[in-house]
């Protein structure tokens, strides 16, 4: 009797509930896309993919958080966090066919030791960029197990706004009209709280170093969104650089914030995307990025964006000044991004998921 509180904890009750629903109610679906229990970027990937595929009628799909109880289905784990723990892979019924998305490889992630096991325990591994594919192969995953499909962007939500609308958005956000607005919308602090400890793979230290130097040459204001931004905010305050931080609970609400930007900075050391590259491009905002994730796959340096080596603060700074001060370069980049971004619409990307991943597995 004394163990009842443990067995009937909220977590265990949720697993029991999901088991019942998955096992006896959801079995009419062909594909289950497992997302993290947080309404942020990865969860919305799953929503976009399943929504598009359901609309197309190609396959019956549903996003879920807990895969317990599933049988004879395709189960797509939307990130390594949804399938792999520090102790190994979660138990999933062997009648299911497993797909895992692994966006980026961190050398400090203890779970990378389980990568060779994926050759035997999953049907396919999806990743969004060639950089991660090469790292997965180097760590023991067979190349024929990997499918590369980039991230997508909703072009109905992310698009260039007219100048008057941009000015209105800046006023609504209380942004200065006489400064360059520099954007950083990714989660770069550890955990889901204040985020005072930096998540160094995201390069928040590099971002702050670059912005501090940039502020000595140009009038800048930083626009932040997303959770766990404490480290960046503390650094900006210490450097006396003005900033605005808006916490957005519903991820799609982020779209208008891009329109307020003059430049989006990606200073990461490891990435699977970031999706902000595509969202900035779709919004008509020039991007300066380190050579991480899908950046080298999408950005042609000097044509539709500017690239810098990882940790090269001076190169990132030089590229940023070039875009902000040289209208000719800026206009060229914005014009070319509109041509680039069309093929990354979620409707096209979701169809690629079906054609390259789901349809072949359904036929086996």
Image: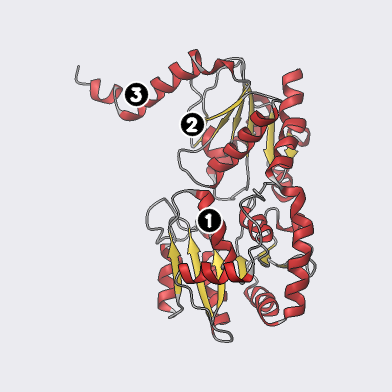
- Horizontal side of 256 relative to 149 (left or right) equals left
- Mark 3 or 1 closer to N-term? 3
In this rendering, does residue 24 appear at all?
A: yes
Identity of the residue furthest to the top in this view:
24
In this view, 55 is above or below 152:
above
- Which class describes the residues within 10 Å of circle 2: few (<14), some (14-19), or many (20+)? some
Of the 4 image quadrants, the one containing the C terminus is top right
Query: In percent of the image, x 35 and y 29: which residue is there?
Result: 11
- C-alpha distance separating marks 3 and 1: 34 Å
Quarter assignment of residue 51: top right
Q: Which mark is residue 127?
A: none
- Which class describes the residues within 10 Å of circle 3: few (<14), some (14-19), or many (20+)? few
Which residue is label 3 attached to? 13
Locate residue 212, reporting x and y percent. 52, 79
Q: Nearer the viewer, residue 31 or 109?
A: 31
- Horizontal side of 193 relative to 163 (left or right) equals left
Locate residue 84, reporting x and y percent. 53, 34
- Which class describes the residues within 10 Å of circle 1: few (<14), some (14-19), or many (20+)? some
Mark 3 lies on a secondary structure that is helix
Marks 3 and 1 in Cβ contact (< 8 Å)? no
- C-alpha distance separating marks 3 and 2: 14 Å
Q: Which mark is residue 65?
A: 2
Query: In percent of the image, x 77 and y 37: which residue is there?
Result: 143
Q: Which mark is residue 254?
A: 1
Query: In percent of the image, x 62 and y 53: which residue is there?
Result: 275
Eye-nearest disc, 1 or 2: 1
Identity of the residue furthest to the left in this view:
2
Eye-nearest disc, 3 or 1: 1
Mark 2 lies on a secondary structure that is loop
């Amino acid at each position: 009797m004394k163990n009842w509180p443990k067995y009937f904890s909220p977590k265990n009750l949720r697993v029991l509930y999901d088991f019942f629903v998955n096992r006896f109610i959801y079995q009419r679906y062909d594909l289950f896309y497992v997302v993290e229990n947080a309404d942020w970027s990865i969860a919305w990937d799953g929503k976009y993919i399943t929504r598009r595929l359901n609309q197309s009628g190609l396959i019956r799909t549903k996003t879920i958080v807990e895969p317990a109880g599933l049988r004879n289905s395709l189960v797509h784990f939307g990130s390594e966090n949804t399938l792999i723990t520090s102790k190994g892979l979660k138990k999933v019924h062997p009648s299911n066919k497993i797909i895992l998305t692994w966006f980026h490889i961190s050398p400090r992630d203890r779970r990378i030791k389980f990568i060779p096991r994926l050759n035997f325990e999953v049907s396919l591994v999806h990743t969004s960029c060639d950089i991660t594919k090469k790292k997965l192969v180097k760590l023991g995953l067979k190349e024929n197990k990997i499918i590369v499909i980039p991230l997508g962007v909703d072009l109905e939500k992310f698009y260039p706004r007219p100048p008057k609308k941009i000015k209105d958005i800046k006023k609504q956000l209380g942004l200065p009209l006489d400064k360059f607005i520099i954007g950083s919308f990714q989660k770069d602090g550890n955990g889901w709280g204040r985020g005072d400890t930096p998540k160094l793979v995201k390069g928040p230290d590099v971002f702050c170093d670059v912005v501090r130097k940039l502020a000595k040459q140009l009038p800048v204001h930083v626009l932040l969104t997303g959770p766990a931004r404490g480290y960046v905010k503390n650094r900006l305050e210490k450097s006396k650089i003005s900033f605005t931080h808006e916490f957005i609970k519903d991820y799609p609400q982020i779209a208008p914030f891009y329109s307020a930007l003059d430049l989006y900075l990606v200073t990461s050391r490891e990435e699977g995307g970031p999706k902000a590259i595509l969202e900035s491009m779709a919004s008509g905002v020039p991007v300066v990025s380190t050579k991480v994730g899908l950046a080298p796959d999408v950005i042609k340096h000097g044509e539709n964006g500017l690239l810098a080596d990882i940790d090269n603060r001076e190169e990132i700074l030089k590229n940023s000044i070039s875009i902000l001060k040289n209208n000719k370069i800026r206009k060229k980049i914005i014009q070319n991004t509109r041509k680039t971004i069309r093929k990354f619409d979620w409707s096209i990307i979701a169809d690629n998921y079906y054609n390259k991943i789901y349809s072949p597995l359904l036929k086996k």
